[in-house]
């Protein structure tokens, strides 16, 4: 498959680029941060995104979506990365929707998917329990009691947990820590007795949450998929998320490259444009090459997800590459902007902070290089 966008995808890209540049630029994120906005995003923006079809990209028309697949989701995520647009898009429309779509019962799909696509319901996934990603490391317990389950444990680094209407919790119903088998998914409604959410504003000025469950009782209807067999569908949904996160990192990398090249063409030192310095030209050219390689890796991974052809291998390849390129791009942007790159008044700092959070979500460089090697037979 050619590593280029088709006509419909190109139109989506143009629409998304224009929408986020106008409606949710970096200045909006700065305002949300400075105002200490409790929601962490503009509800009006999220409604407009839903109207544009962005919240239903992964869902078919029968499910209330627009059926643009992972490639469409990646296109929108890249535009959001360029503008650092804050919304529940990733948590709800990507990971949450993927889990409901692939693991949910008919009743769960009919009740939740159209609501996600319309932006009326926000869903997020609670999977990690430490600073290191690893679904198999789950220790949160779900114990069967008559016709219900009792959940106890804690999850960390949960995106948009404080605004989520439903939280999909990964719990262990069998096995021990480190086992991929014995994991189950439960849909916990907001306000459930025993559900405690501590909101945390991270360095990227987004809202994350620590989710604690103390004797949370749910019925069997709350189970998503098959008890004890959640890992395959969970990993599949995470791979969709990892590819979309890679697309966001691509957007961040491209934007800081563009801003840096523009700065090199404007900034003078001793009466000479610094963009004429050969050393800086080499660094900018190297960064450009790395961003273009990343672009190909991300698009191939998104295509693999839609086609179902070895998506895990390509997802880890894209996420590992995206982590490295985003780190290089943001570091180079800070350095080549000189002293002003370190100041809060300048926007480059916002990009490096967001990049570091996204790099670590659902596995960083080390996690995915190891996973890529394992999937390759090493």
Image (cartoon, helix red, strand yellow):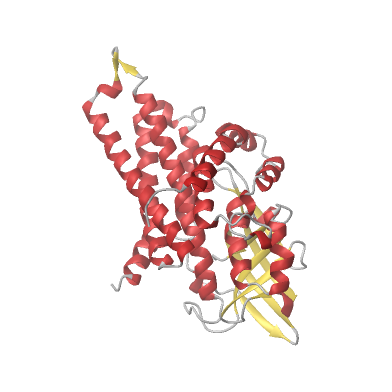
Q: Name the residue rendered at 29%, 22% in the picture.
A: 274
Residue 256, image x, y percentages:
42, 36
Farthest residue to the bottom: give it.
146
Residue 9, image x, y percentages:
50, 47
Q: Quadrant of the N terminus?
A: bottom left
- Is residue 158 at all visible to an observer of this figure? no
Q: Name the residue rendered at 48%, 62% in the picture.
A: 306
Give the camera-side residue of 118 and 28.
118
Farthest residue to the left: give it.
278
Left or right side of 366 for 138: right
Give the camera-side residue of 367 and 99.
99
> How many numbered marks appear?
0
Left or right side of 64 for 246: left
Residue 234, image x, y percentages:
54, 70
Farthest residue to the top: give it.
271
Residue 73, image x, y percentages:
54, 52
Give the answer, above or below, for where 50 lies relative to 189.
above
Res. 31 image quadrant = top right
Q: Quadrant of the C terminus?
A: bottom left
Q: Name the residue rendered at 53%, 84% in the picture.
A: 175
Give the answer, above or below, for where 355 lies relative to 154.
above
Give the answer, above or below, for where 65 lies relative to 76.
below
Give the answer, above or below, for where 299 lies relative to 306.
above
- Is residue 206 at all visible to an observer of this figure? yes
Give the camera-side residue of 37 and 153.
37
Left or right side of 360 for 211: right
């Amino acid at each position: 498959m050619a590593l280029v966008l088709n006509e419909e995808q190109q139109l989506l890209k143009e629409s998304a680029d224009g929408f986020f540049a106008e409606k949710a630029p970096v200045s909006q994120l700065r305002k949300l941060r400075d105002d200490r906005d409790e929601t962490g995003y503009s509800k009006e923006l999220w409604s407009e995104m839903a109207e544009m079809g962005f919240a239903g990209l992964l869902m078919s028309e029968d499910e209330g979506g627009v059926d643009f697949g992972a490639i469409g989701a990646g296109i929108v995520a890249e535009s959001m990365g360029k503008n650092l647009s804050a919304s529940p898009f990733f948590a709800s429309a990507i990971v949450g929707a993927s889990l409901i779509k692939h693991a949910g019962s008919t009743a769960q799909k009919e009740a939740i998917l159209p609501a996600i696509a319309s932006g009326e319901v926000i869903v997020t996934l609670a999977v990690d329990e430490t600073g290191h990603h690893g679904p198999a490391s789950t220790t949160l317990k779900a114990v069967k009691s008559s016709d219900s389950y009792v959940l106890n444990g804690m999850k960390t680094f949960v995106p948009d947990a404080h605004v989520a209407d439903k939280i999909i919790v990964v719990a262990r119903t069998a096995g021990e820590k480190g086992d991929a088998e014995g994991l189950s998914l439960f849909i916990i409604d907001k306000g459930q007795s025993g559900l405690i959410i501590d909101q945390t504003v991270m360095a990227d000025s987004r809202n994350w949450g620590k989710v604690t469950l103390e004797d949370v009782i749910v019925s069997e209807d709350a189970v998503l998929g098959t008890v004890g067999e959640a890992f395959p569908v969970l990993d599949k949904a995470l791979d969709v998320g990892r590819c979309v996160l890679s697309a966001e990192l691509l957007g961040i990398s491209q934007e800081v490259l563009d801003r840096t090249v523009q700065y090199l063409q404007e900034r003078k030192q001793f009466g000479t444009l610094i963009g004429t310095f050969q050393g800086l030209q080499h660094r900018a050219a190297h960064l450009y090459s790395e961003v273009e390689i990343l672009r190909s890796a991300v698009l191939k991974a998104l295509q693999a997800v839609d086609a179902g052809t070895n998506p895990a291998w390509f997802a880890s390849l894209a996420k590992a590459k995206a982590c490295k390129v985003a780190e290089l791009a943001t570091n180079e942007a800070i350095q080549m902007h000189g002293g002003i790159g370190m100041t809060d008044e300048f926007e480059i700092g916002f990009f490096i902070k967001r990049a570091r959070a996204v790099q670590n979500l659902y596995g960083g460089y080390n996690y995915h290089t190891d996973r890529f090697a394992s999937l390759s037979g090493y």
